[in-house]
Amino acid sequence: KVRKNLVEKNEIEAIIGLPENLFYNTRISVIMMIISKNKTDKNILFIDASNEYKNKRFKNILSEENQNKIVNTYKDRKEIEGFSKIVSINQIKENDYNLSIKKELLYHSVSRYRQTLSSSLNTTVHTKV
C-alpha cells in the first residue's frame, strides 16, 4: 500500500539500487528512494548502480567516479542502456506498482529487442518477462 500510495501521489523521483556489501553488517544490496512532493513530471528514474563499486578488503565502496556517475545520471535524468531508465507512472501502474529496478531495465531492453527483431523479420515477435 505504501508503494502504491507513493506512485499514485507522484512522489517518487528516483529509485537507485546500490551495490551489496556497501554498509557494515549489511551484505545485501540496498536502494535509495528519492521522494519529492513537488514533482512536475509523471515519470520515475530507475538507476541500477549495483555494479558501480570498488572492492576494498571486506566491503565495497563507491569511488568518486562511481558517485559522480550516479549523481550526474540523477541530476540530468539521463537514460543509459543497462544503467538507467525513465519509466512513466502509467507503466508502473500497469506492472502492478512493481518498483524493481532490474525488472524495469530488463523489460525495456527486451521490448526494444522485440521491436527491432519484429521489424527485421517483418512480423510480430512475442516475449514474456
Image (cartoon, grey):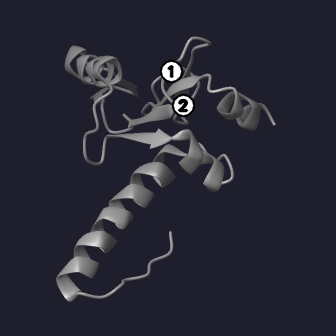
Any part of residue 31 in sight:
yes
Cβ–Cβ under 8 Å for marks 2 and 1: yes
The residue that appears at 55% across and 36% down in the rendered structure is 28
Expressed as whole percent of the image width and height from the top left, the position of residue 42 reads 52, 31
The residue that appears at 62% across and 22% down in the rendered structure is 11
Residue designated by label 2: 30
Expressed as whole percent of the image width and height from the top left, the position of residue 78 reads 28, 31
Front residue of 79/15: it is 79
Any part of residue 20 in sight:
no
Where, quadrant-wise, is the N terminus in this rendering?
top right
Residue 25 is left or right of residue 83, and the answer is right
Q: Nearer the viewer, mark 2 or mark 1?
A: 2
The residue that appears at 22% across and 78% down in the rendered structure is 119
Q: Residues within 10 Å of mark 1 (few under 14, many from 20)?
A: some
> On residue 23, which mark appears?
1
The residue that appears at 54% across and 33% down in the rendered structure is 27
| Amino acid type assigned to the residue bearing label 2 in the image | Val
Q: Quadrant of residue 26?
A: top right
Residue 96 is left or right of residue 104, and the answer is right
Q: Residues within 10 Å of mark 2 (few under 14, many from 20)?
A: some
Expressed as whole percent of the image width and height from the top left, the position of residue 124 reads 36, 84
